[in-house]
Image (cartoon, rainbow, N blue to C red):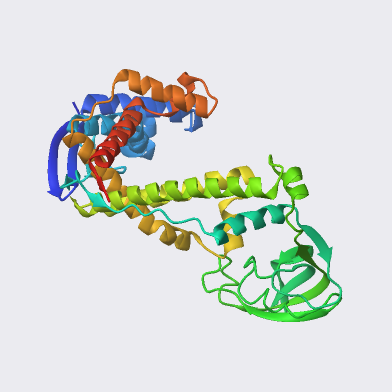
Amino acid sequence: MSLKATNNVGTNSYELEIEIPAKDFEEALEKAYLKARKNISLPGFRKGKAPRKLIEKNYGEEVFYEDAVNLLYAPVVNGAIDESGLDLVCQPEVEVTEISKENGVKLKATCTTKPEVEVKDYKGIEVEKVVNDVTDEDIQKKLDELREKNVRIVTVDDRAAENGDTVKIDFEGFKDGVAFDGGKAEDFDLELGSGQFIPGFEDQIVGHSTGEQFDINVTFPEEYQVKDLAGAAAIFKINLKSISKKELPELDDDMVKDSTDFDTVDEYKADVKAKLEESAQKAADTKVEGDLFDKVIENMTAEIPPVMFDNRVNEMVAELEQRMAPQGISLDMYMQFTGQNLDTIKKGYAEQAEKQVKLRLALEKVAEVENVQVTDEELEDEFKKLADTYKMEVEQVKSLIRAEDLRKDLSVGKAVDIIKESAVIK
């Protein structure tokens, strides 16, 4: 047993006193020596053949201490955490407080744990359900989307560029008269008014005509990801090569036949209305669920360690990277396109992350109070659903997702059902 004491040193904070016996430390020292000796040379010995005691005499008794502790670290610390029964929310901070061949090793692990949570009045929550009416304007917007799918792009040569036009341009950027990396492109298609470029860039192209060459002056945002350009003034030389615009066709029966499963505009319009009404119902249900969750969070009390919010923000950034990866877009590229840096992205996620962490803690507490049980059969069914969804073998899914974590997710889902079923919907 490596755990000698568990000390509560503050809210959600514990210090574990961990000891590694001298015998175990000596075994780890021998393993560290055997692993390292092939790279050690001493006079009179072939490389890799120097005795351990002679190496320690030449390089110091502590020469293998760090490697030996590293060999023992994971099993010893993880074993102590399991033995303590603490539910940690992040990796502990571990320091060596004593180390010697005679007495072994003593460690201190500072741990941050899940908070104690209380949730009151989670049953019978009153919320209002409002289903928005589907307007003629809503229907027309969907009809216009069909027209957009059949849009024609026509060249404009009788007027200057306007917002909404797509221009083909060559451009090159200069700071203090010197061209900078990443500031040049040829035959670039830019929709004016899209906000694709930094503020002021697109606005200054408006009003110019095909064939014009001109300069525009811009200032990069203070938080621009390229430090050398952040807050800097720049000049872009523009060559406007062409202007084009979208030309929307009239919506008629022929277009509907060619583009949908319907024969007439009236049939298509009726289907659009039905789907919008269904969507309005779903939106109302989603709003009801959100209002219920807000009430649950309001009725929860807990001193939540800030690291839990930080962890969720980091997870959300990782999820963003995963979503963009199939498109060949890295996080660095995304930040360049949007003019953001990692800090601004994290700040944008902070409020949502805090809400998600609080809700999860509250729902876990509801599941505990209600003694929610998840059967082995339910767990197995969920593994099969995930395997079908991701077109994987069940055993492969099980290798990626811990049964304990999935069981907890299912119990949280049942807690949501308890809250919904008892809610008073007005």
Q: Position of residue 243 (x, y in %)?
A: 81, 69
Q: Is residue 150 left or right of residue 309?
A: right
Count numbered badges in the picture. 0
Q: Residue at x 33, y 47 (%)?
A: 289
Task: Tell me if residue 317 can be seen.
Answer: yes
| Residue 116, placed above or below residue 56 | below
Q: Is residue 180 left or right of residue 98?
A: right
| Residue 136, placed above or below residue 54 | below
Closest to the observer, 94 or 403: 403
Q: Position of residue 322 (x, y in %)?
A: 53, 44
Task: Tell me if residue 49 can be seen.
Answer: no
Q: Is residue 236 left or right of residue 34?
A: right
| Residue 351, placed above or below residue 120 | below
Q: Residue at x 59, y 71 (%)?
A: 228
Quarter of the N terminus within the rendering? top left
Q: Is residue 325 left or right of residue 192?
A: left
Closest to the observer, 141 or 368: 141
Q: Position of residue 313 (x, y in %)?
A: 40, 52
Q: Position of residue 235 (x, y in %)?
A: 70, 79
